[in-house]
Image: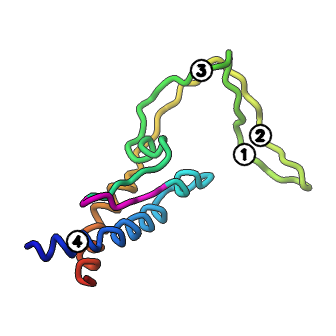
Amino acid sequence: MNEIVEKLEKALPEIARRIQNELTLAAPVDAGRLRNSIKVKAEGNSLVIWMVGYGKFVEFGTPPHVITPENKKALKFEVGRIERLKGKKKGKKEVIVKKVKHPGTRPNPFIRNILQNKLKKIIIEEIMKQ
């Protein structure tokens, strides 16, 4: 049994690298900030995964909630699609409001999916290389 533990400890950095690659590929992409922030590191006999703070909201979703300004009197944002006509952006509208009723977001459990579906195989493959 100690032999397996020793092999696992040696393999852990490579397991971390492979899980990081899998998570990066699986992460949803808007601007790429979440994807670019994903890091997985072997620390002792554990894997530590971290990313930008809103990653937890992508993974677990959010309930409906009200968004209000924190440091200003109002919220300002654009809505609509950008259409390019003759080199000009068209179709976005600027909105200024005191609050927004956000409908919430569905969970996108990309982290749990990778851990449930790929981690065991990666661990076995990396232990066998030792």
> Mark 4 — residue?
8
Image mark for residue 81: 1
Secondary structure under the numbered disc 1 in the rendered image: loop
In this rendering, is residue 119 above or below 3? above
- Which region of the structure is painted magenta? 38-45
Mark 4 or 3 closer to N-term?
Answer: 4
Check disc 1: other Cα within 10 Å, few if <14, some if 14-19, many if 20+.
Answer: few
Tell me what residue is drawn at x 50 percent, y 46 percent. 52
Looking at the image, the residue that sits furthest to the bottom is 129
What distance separates the C-alpha of mark 4 from that of mark 3?
Answer: 47 Å
> Marks 2 and 1: CB-CB under 8 Å?
yes
Under mark 4, the amino acid is Leu
Crowding near the residue tagged with mark 2, few <14, some 14–19, many ≥20 C-alpha atoms within 10 Å: few
Disc 3 to disc 1, how far (Cα)? 27 Å
Q: Position of residue 112 (x, y in %)?
A: 32, 55
- The residue identified by callout 3 is 70
Viewer-proximal residue among 115 and 109? 115
Q: Are marks 3 and 2 in contact (CB under 8 Å)?
A: no
Residue 67 higher or lower than 39, as above or below: above
Tell me, for residue 92, which label it has, or none: 2
Q: Secondary structure at mark 4?
A: helix
Q: Compared to 124, does 96 lie above or below?
A: above
Give the label, 4 or 3, closer to the camera: 4
Asked which secondary structure carries label 3, the reply is: loop
Q: CA distance from mark 2 to mark 1?
A: 6 Å
Q: Amino acid at mark 2?
A: Lys
